[in-house]
Image (cartoon, coloured by chain):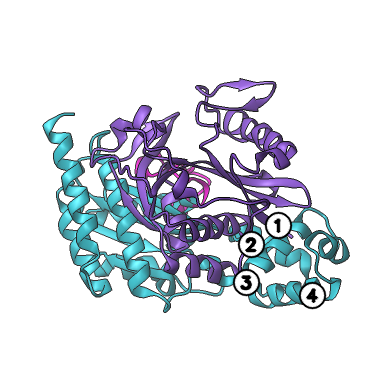
């Protein structure tokens, strides 16, 4: 069964294979399939400046195979919305120690029938609730909005849609809530937690580097 | 950022924030009608897609349409030949009515619906397809005779329409079941494996459930889709965009 594994700087060593597979899949999905030309890649792996010790990955893994993934990054550090997509957040960029940026979300092609999406979306709400993260920021294609809303995510637009790589995209803030978690679980018939934490992981918010953004 | 641009943004955010205060679907119709007038729109409809057994009026969520046109559209069952509805199923991007292709010679009924709409001041239009977690769900189509559609206005309209749809859905739930909720996620998953050529036993192995459970899900999907067997269920699920390949 598919589980969503929490991978941080602390336990990353025990997930070396899966992280590599995740970077390979990111190349497959974002560069080859979606055609995002500005992304860098080395040896078929898509890796950017935010894939560092501050990143947290929630990877959907089914019998050692990565079937989807997503990344969280502290908004107190320079992050994609502050460095690259600032013009899209006309209402201001939410930045706080308990607000994280949510990027590089995907589900592999053959699993795009909804359930794996719901698992990943439930996992992110659950993880944030457990860690005390109150909100996420993200830049997404507009067609994602009704999907998020359908699964009960509370989404506030930070600006008007802007065309990126030929697609209308939007900067948004998602308020984390137990309601949203219940709703997405309910919709997909997910019972209980699918979140796996291997190793001793310290509370995430205690480790947010307090660097002025 | 230009001053005009900023006004559209303010307009859009005020509209979206205001939606939360609306208590019933009629209020959403009123709010949309008022805000969208600024862009020249006179009519709009938010609708799902009827399956062969449903009638159009059963899947309409909200509408501000001329009554005469609604009667004609329903009576003639135009929803099944409307090129706007068809394009909605095949794109996630908003589009202008003039961008929806059809062949007036081979598809006379498509030409007819577009032509007769103009009798009701529905000359130009803008349409937003809504795709949920399991594919196509609904269409938000708006029209008028003199629209202010430009790269400056469209982003605001796009965003406003999406939030209006969501508010309508919240206020109408759970009365009209969303099309995608016809099948459970598990039923859809199993039909997708069936579409990939997997037997019930294979699918059971893949999903870690028994063959018997897989068969039960298929039977349930067949019943919901009014299909006599797995093959027809897969065909119908594809046709209604309940599953994709």
For label 2, the residue is A194
User: In terms of secondary structure, where does tag 3 sit?
Assistant: loop
Residue B87 appears anywhere in the view: no
For label 1, the residue is A2
Q: Position of residue B85 (x, y in %)?
A: 45, 54
Between disc 2 and disc 1, whose residue precedes? Answer: 1
- The answer for how far apart the CA atoms under marks 3 and 4 are is 18 Å
Chain B colour as displayed: cyan
Q: Residue at x 41, y 57 (%)?
A: B139
Q: Chain of mark 3?
A: A
- Place residue B134 in its image quadrant: bottom right
Which stretch appears magenta?
B89-110
Q: Is residue A182 magenta?
A: no
Looking at the image, is B103 positioned above or below residue B88? above
Contact check, label 4 and label 2, Cβ < 8 Å: no
Q: Chain of mark 2?
A: A
């Amino acid at each position: 069964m598919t589980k969503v594994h929490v991978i941080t700087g602390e336990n990353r060593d025990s997930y070396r294979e899966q992280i590599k597979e995740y970077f390979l899949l990111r190349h497959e999905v974002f560069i080859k399939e979606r055609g995002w030309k500005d992304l860098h890649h080395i040896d078929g792996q898509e890796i950017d400046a935010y894939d560092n010790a501050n990143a947290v990955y929630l990877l959907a893994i089914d019998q050692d195979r990565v079937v989807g993934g997503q990344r969280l990054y502290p908004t107190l550090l320079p992050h994609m919305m502050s460095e690259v997509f600032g013009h899209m957040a006309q209402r201001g960029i939410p930045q706080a120690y308990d607000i994280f940026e949510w990027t590089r979300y995907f589900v592999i092609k053959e699993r795009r029938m909804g359930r794996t999406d719901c698992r990943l979306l439930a996992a992110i709400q659950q993880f944030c609730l457990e860690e005390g993260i109150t909100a996420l920021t993200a830049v997404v294609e507009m067609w994602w909005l009704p999907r998020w809303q359908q699964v009960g995510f509370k989404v506030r637009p930070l600006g008007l849609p802007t065309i990126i790589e030929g697609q209308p995209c939007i900067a948004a803030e998602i308020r984390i809530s137990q309601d949203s978690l219940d709703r997405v679980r309910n919709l997909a018939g997910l019972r209980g937690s699918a979140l796996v934490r291997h190793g001793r992981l310290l509370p995430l918010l205690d480790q947010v580097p307090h660097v002025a953004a | 950022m230009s001053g005009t641009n900023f006004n559209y943004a303010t307009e859009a955010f005020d509209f979206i924030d205001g939606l939360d205060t609306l208590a019933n679907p009629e209020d959403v119709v009123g709010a949309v009608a008022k805000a969208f007038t600024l862009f020249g729109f006179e009519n709009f409809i938010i609708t799902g897609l009827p399956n062969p057994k449903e009638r159009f009026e059963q899947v309409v969520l909200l509408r501000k349409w001329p009554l005469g046109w609604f009667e004609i559209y329903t009576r003639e069952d135009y929803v099944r030949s409307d090129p706007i509805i068809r394009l909605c199923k095949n794109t996630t991007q908003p589009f202008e009515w003039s961008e929806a292709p059809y062949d007036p010679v081979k598809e006379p009924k498509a030409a007819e619906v577009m032509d007769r709409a103009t009798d009701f001041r529905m000359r130009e239009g803008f349409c937003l397809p809504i795709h949920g977690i399991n594919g196509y769900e609904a269409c938000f189509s708006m029209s008028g005779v003199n629209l202010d559609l430009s790269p400056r206005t469209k982003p605001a309209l796009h965003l406003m329409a999406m939030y209006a749809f969501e508010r309508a859905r919240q206020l109408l739930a759970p009365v009209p079941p969303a099309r995608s909720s016809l099948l459970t996620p598990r039923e859809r998953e199993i039909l997708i494996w069936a579409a990939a050529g997997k037997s019930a036993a294979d699918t059971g192995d893949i999903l870690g459930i028994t063959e018997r459970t897989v068969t039960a899900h298929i039977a349930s999907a067949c019943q919901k889709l009014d299909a006599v067997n797995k093959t027809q269920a897969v065909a119908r699920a594809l046709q209604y965009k309940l599953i994709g390949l």
